[in-house]
Image: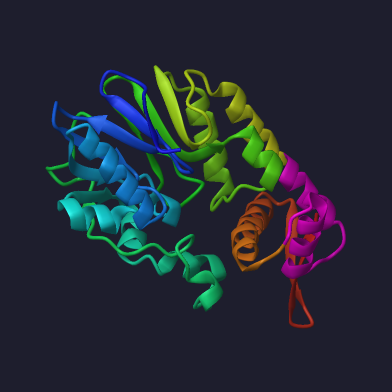
Amino acid sequence: MYELVQTGEKSFYINCPAKIGVYLADQQNVYLIDSGNDKDAGRKVRQILERNGWKLKGILNTHSNADHIGGNRYLQNQTGCKVFAGGIEAAFTRYPILEPSFLYGGYPCKDLRHKFLLAQDSNVTCFSDGSFPEEIEIIPLPGHFFDMVGFRTPDQTVFLADCISSKETLEKYAISFIYDVESYLNTLNKVEAMKAAKFVPAHAEASADVRELVQYNREKIYEVADCLLGICSEPVTFEQALQKIFNRYGLVMNFEQYVLVGSTVRSYLSWLKDKGEISADFQNNQLLWRSV
């Protein structure tokens, strides 16, 4: 864990739970792509950079989930580096309480205010700032989160953030977190058509060809959608639908899984409703979902 792996002439990744990219801008200066899940991750990253004689110029955040921005504050305090983020992700990175609040749909109780969902805040610079490394291409990859992006380095290494998960992860957890199902499917189509020397997903093995894995992720989306349509063959509340989803996939509910899977199920229901495959009706002061 936390080994440095080279993928191109100037591109590397640090192998950890959410892979951290490293772009060598010149012999001394580097940019990180994400920063890991907490201060300890940031410390390990700093040690790797120091061993190689590299100076951290900036962190390019793909999105604002805590496991990708958790090392920002520590590294920024230690090195004075800039943290680059865009769109809604920039707001969540400045004000990390937004993540658990969004997931829960209200003020999060203490059970949700921990490092896995609530990173420390960091100072953010927009991608449009003149200090952003202009040779790096920003690739919009919405769907998993609001304004998630990937990055292509000059040696044609593409960092894909969380737009695809490994088969092992999907088999274990069944339902990957998704904010916008339609955008996510469009992103899968986009990634499937991409060419690169090496793709580096945050939660899957680096590979020169990710088309098979993209298709597997796509199939899982439609599998979960079909499951929900079956659950909603009779009118159910959201809580009933969520319980049935947990039972169907053998998941164990706790606060973290309740908000992560729950938010995703709500996104599926919205998508299916907008497509006309599920109706939503209010009866006896309850919102009931039913397949059309």
Residue 125, position in %: x, y? 20, 53
Q: Residue at 12%, 43% (x, y): give it.
A: 130
Question: Does residue 56 appear anywhere in the picture?
Answer: yes
Task: Please say if 59 is above or below 76.
Answer: above
Image coordinates for residue 75, horizontal then vertical, percent: 25, 52
State the residue at coordinates (40%, 38%).
Answer: 2
x then y, percent, for residue 112: 53, 70
Q: Give the range drawn in magenta.
A: 223-252
Main SS category, magenta section: helix
Q: Which residue is drawn at 37% across and 44% down?
A: 62
Residue 239 falls in image quadrant: bottom right
Specify the color scheme: rainbow
- Magenta segment includes 224: yes
Residue 212 % position (x, y): 61, 23
Q: Judge by depth and name the residue closer to the eye, 85 or 202.
A: 202
Give the residue displayed 63% in from the left and 52% down from the top: 271
Residue 139 shows up from this direction? no
Determine whether 88 is above or below 54 in the image: below
Position of residue 128 relative to residue 28, above or below, is: below
Q: For residue 45: magenta?
A: no
